[in-house]
Amino acid sequence: MQTIAVLMTCHNRREKTLACLDALFGSDRVIDAAFEVFLVDDGSTDGTGDAVKASYPAVHVITGDGNLYWNGGMRVAFGGAMQTGFDFYLWLNDDTVLYPDAMDALLALANAENRIRQKPVIIVGTTQDAPGGGPTYGGLCRKSIWRPLKHSITFSQTEPTPCETMNGNCVLVPSAVATQLGNLEPAFVHAMGDIDYGLRATKAGFPLVVLPRYVGVCSHNPVTNTFLDGRLSRRDRWAKIMSLKGLPPKQWYVLVRRHAGLMWPLLFVWPYIRVALGVGGKRK
């Protein structure tokens, strides 16, 4: 029997977190596999942790202090699970509602790709905005050699698709990959850790493959009131881009210095120049 550690982190989204767990524990299971959930409750004040313990006592609830954010919380969950050791580690956003057979589909493709390639493969799940809607998060490919960190989603419903990196909403990581690459990068606090992990995996020779079907529903995060919101003043956009949920310079530096090649100095300053000039924002 194969074992899977499901890694999650949450903060004050009790209903969404419970809906995610409801779908996970209510999934149809055909493949012989067992899973355990490692959930970091990062300082929630809405009773998320207690509600999870009451509804799903088997979940390993780890309490954070409210300063972990996504990457930090997932690092704690990942680290806790790796101490036990599992065949696979499933990254799962708590606002993602999986379809009933999603876990089986991810695991089946992982095993099939492993047999074909004779090496462990990261399987990336694609989410959609709503049933019948288009893709929101999933596997990512570079749009241009001149913009090495500008990625767009890649997805096919007919065949597995290779990708360069991924959003971390639903990703199945084999133990051999986790052993070699280790945990998520501690330099990142909220965002960028998933992109970095996928790029590190690609550089290390581990293929990333997108499952040829949707795994569940996860709506796009709105750009409203972020540094991408062109309706905000330049002062407000500057404050947003410098925040932990924006594009904090020290963390952005790590990503571009590591993955942007010789053009990294230009790519590092470019987002801040655009915000300072008041250009590049979205108005919808």
Image (tube, rainbow, N blue to C red):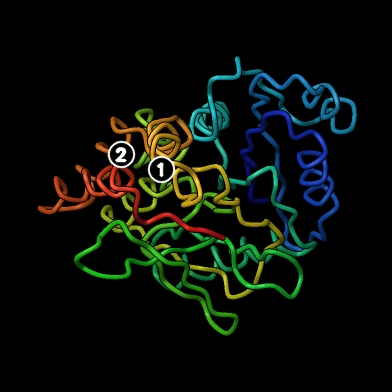
Q: Quadrant of residue 98?
A: bottom right
Looking at the image, the residue that sits furthest to the front is: 233
Q: Quadrant of residue 255?
A: top left
Name the disc covering residue 221, or none: none
Q: Which of the image's four quarters has the C terminus? A: bottom right
Residue corresponding to mark 1: 192
Closer to the camera in the image, 143 or 75: 143
Q: Amino acid at mark 2?
A: Trp
**Residue 232 percent location from the top left of the image:** 49, 44
First in residue order: circle 2 vs circle 1: 1
Alpha carbons under labels 2 and 1: distance apart = 8 Å
* Residue 120 vertical placement versus 49 (above, below): below
**Residue 63 percent location from the top left of the image:** 66, 18
Residue corresponding to mark 2: 252
Looking at the image, the residue that sits furthest to the left is: 262
Closer to the camera in the image, 244 or 118: 244
In percent of the image, x 71 and y 22: which residue is there?
A: 44
Q: Are marks 2 and 1 in contact (CB under 8 Å)?
A: yes
